[in-house]
Image (cartoon, rainbow, N blue to C red):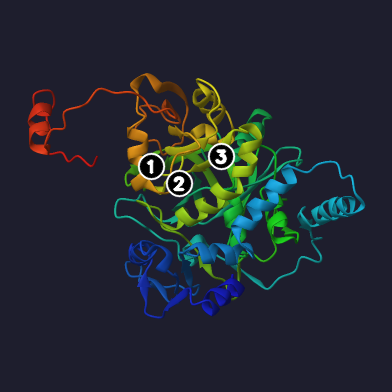
Amino acid sequence: MKEFIQILKENDLLRVIEEPVDVDLEIAHLAYIEAKKGEKGKALLFKNPIDKKLNKQYKFPVLMNTFCNKKALNLAFGRDYEEVAEEISKLIKLHIPTSFKAKMDFFMNLLSFKNIPPKRLKKNKALYDYEILNSLEELPILKTWEDDAGKFITMGQVYTQNLDKTQNNLGMYRLQMSDKNELLIHWQIHKDGANFYHEYKNAGFKKMPVSIAIGGDPLYIWCSQAPLPKGIFELLLYGFIKKTPVKLTPCENGIFVPYDSDVVIEGYVDLEEFKIEGPFGDHTGFYTPAELFPVMKVEKIYAKKDAIYQATVVGKPPLEDKIMGLGTERIFLPLLQTSVPDLLDYNMPENGVFHNLILAKIDAKYPAHAQQIMHAFWGVGQMSFVKHAIFVDKNAPSLKDYDALIPYILNRFDAEKILISEGICDQLDHASPNSCFGGKAGLDACEEIQVEELEILEDEKLLELFKTKVELLNLKQFY
């Protein structure tokens, strides 16, 4: 992490704060303000985090807003994220080579794959200068919002493996500190970590090993939220992007983590114990309700002598996750096109909180083509969490030009072209009456329709008309 901090500094993307700042609300609030600056924002390094209530000074600095803008994302990748997307697109379209040059290019492509799989270091060679901490209380874990249930680790890389150790998983789940050596793991029922949990439990085990890494190469945490197919280890993506394998070192519980992690928390999930996790101020601007989640018992905590504690702010967009999501959106477009070949482009607006809204441009070739693709979206991996989907044809404006796109959609709006469905949804779908299950809607706006001329009322007259039906305080028309 220190190496990447130096890279940020050399590119004028780092602001260092020497003054003492409280882990209780203050650090998160300053990072929240900085993230709202968009492309002009910088990463923040808090050199002297404190806890005023506990009268405590922490030894480890806190890094916030690591992925502060597109330039920082490219620096974490080591190259332009669009270049990565283009490379994936070319690999998907590989054909049988016919010329000598084509055969050599094909061979070189295959040869480059040798650096993708992670490299496991032997225990006697995986030595590093770590100290053992007594408890989680020695880490500058943040409380972000006033009504949060407590302090949460928000940039934790959660490493798990299945029962027979043939599958490894890296996930990014928030972790509530419920005691000095106890964490509550907020993994949703659809995630691989939760699947492994049930695998251990059904086999009669009482414990499941879990390790959490913080810091190290920032690309690790980006890979943790990548929507890869079930069973594919997320750090394979690191090797593909960086063209060098991740070096993994074994923990005492048998889980492997990156050898350059700044902090490593080892332990196990008690398969018989649940505790109330939350509330937690979430991406939607609302607090996620308190619910029961698994309990992780911490057995050992390792920290580098000069460790950096990495964290992020979760709240109303746009924030740091907008930039992380942009890289995901672009890189996974070619892979999504293998399942939906007539998909030309898609956009997940940050105000839709990613899974709650997607805009898609398609090459519509026949009636109900958009509806066909809606069903494909709702059945593919993490895209199945999408709640609202709007589809436009290939002649539509850019999916990021909202001023032009919104009138284009409205001119093609037809209630008959709305598909209402039900299915799994993200736990952040606060509109659903059920947890992780609810309604979905898709709009086919690919064809221009003939509509009768409408009378456009002023805001005041429209408000009076609505007041006869429902109780309203005010309204404003934008289009």
In the displayed structure, 17 sits above or below 138; it is below
| Coordinates of residue 450 in the picture (x, y in percent) | 33, 23
Which structural element holds mark 3?
A: strand
| Residue in the image at 59% along x and 67% along y | 75
Residue bearing the label numbered 1:
405
Q: Type of residue at label 2?
A: Ser
Q: Type of residue at label 3?
A: Leu
Question: Within 10 Å of the Cα at label 2, are there few (<14), some (14-19), or many (20+) other Cα atoms?
Answer: some
Q: Return the disc, 1 or 2, that comes first in the chain's sequence.
A: 2
| Residue 381 seen by the camera | yes
| Coordinates of residue 230 in the picture (x, y in percent) | 66, 37
**Nearer-the-camera pick, 58 or 120:** 120
Residue bearing the label numbered 3:
344
Which structural element holds mark 1?
A: helix
Q: Type of residue at label 1?
A: Leu
Question: Within 10 Å of the Cα at label 3, are there few (<14), some (14-19), or many (20+) other Cα atoms?
Answer: some
Which structural element holds mark 2?
A: loop
Residue bearing the label numbered 2:
398
Q: In the rendered view of the protein, which quadrant contains the C terminus?
A: top left
Q: Return the disc, 3 or 2, that comes first in the chain's sequence.
A: 3
| Coordinates of residue 382 in the picture (x, y in percent) | 55, 37
Which of the 4 image quarters holds residue 442?
top left
Number of the label disc, if any, that sits on residue 293: none
| Residue in the image at 45% along x and 38% along y | 358
In the displayed structure, 75 sits above or below 432; it is below
Which of the 4 image quarters holds residue 57?
bottom left
In the displayed structure, 261 sits above or below 412; it is below
Alpha-carbon span between mark 1 and mark 2: 7 Å
